[in-house]
Amino acid sequence: MDCAILLCLSGGWPASVPCSRARAEFIRRITPWPVEPPLQIWRCPMRASHELNGTGKNGGRIFDILFDIPRHPLLQTITVAPSQEVGLSSTGVFPAERVETGDKSSDFSITLGRERADIDISGPEFNFVRSIRIFDVRNARQYEAGSEGDCERSAVVVLGTYGVQGDFSWQRSSIGTLPKDHVGLERWGDNCPSIRHRSVFVEWRDYGGKYGYEQVNY
């Protein structure tokens, strides 16, 4: 499945049954809870695909070969063992920590994927992988409180990104970093209209640089 997601994403999700299924899985993974990396490139065995010299440096040829679907069907996903990194549980989830948000505090856990692609994907032909960004907006609230109508605001925003070799990680972010296409918080900071919002927003660019996004409210 992740090989299909990789190829279909790079091609701008072309209209086909395999790419429709791949996109559905891509979106399902960001549907709470928990929010997963939508592309898990470490589950796509690219090193095993049509290499000439076994060095893993012919990644550019994968697209030419595998997009020729009538002769070369998509590779199957290979299930890999969980990460055994020191300091992580077998699921790769850090213990929940407390984050102060105004006069409230929220519990959340941060998942960090230590896995990465099994070939060198540092070249510009794989920029579409690094273009993927996931914004997890957790319980953003704005409301008037107290006898004098003070405006209370609290929010936790976490951003998921991909590294040079497709390794995935989460970091703290803020409402101010949300893409312009995100909807639901347009009046945040505008006087004090009542707002309560939770969503996950994922954006990407395909191989040619065309922009795409999806938002899931919950």
Image: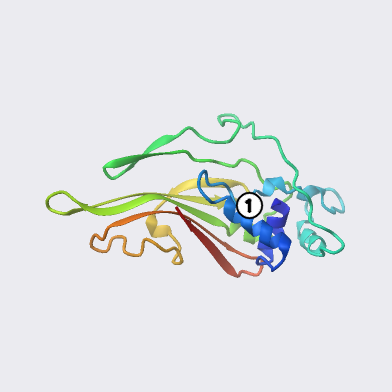
Instruction: Give left or right: position of 142 versus 203.
Output: left
Q: Horizontal and vertical percent for residue 103? A: 26, 42
- Mark 1: which amino acid? Leu
Q: Residue furthest left?
A: 147
The answer to whether residue 19 of the structure is visible from this angle is yes
Q: Is residue 178 above or below residue 171?
A: below
Give the residue number, with chain letter if any, for mark 1.
39
Picture coordinates of residue 120, whole percent (x, y): 72, 51
Nearer to the camera, 138 or 83: 138
Q: Which residue is rendered at x = 72% and y = 66% of the image?
A: 16
**Image coordinates for residue 107, horizontal then vertical, percent:** 40, 38
Residue positioned 68% across, 58% down in the render: 21
In the figure, residue 189 lies in which quadrant? Answer: bottom left
Numbered disc 1: secondary structure = loop
Residue at x 64%, y 59% (from the top left corner): 23
Q: Is residue 188 left or right of residue 61?
A: left
Q: Is residue 21 above or below residue 94?
A: below
Asked whether the viewer can see residue 123, the reply is no
Q: Residues within 10 Å of mark 1 (few under 14, many from 20)?
A: many
**Which residue is rendered at x = 65% and y = 67% of the image?**
12
Residue situated in front as seen by the camera: 39 or 195: 195
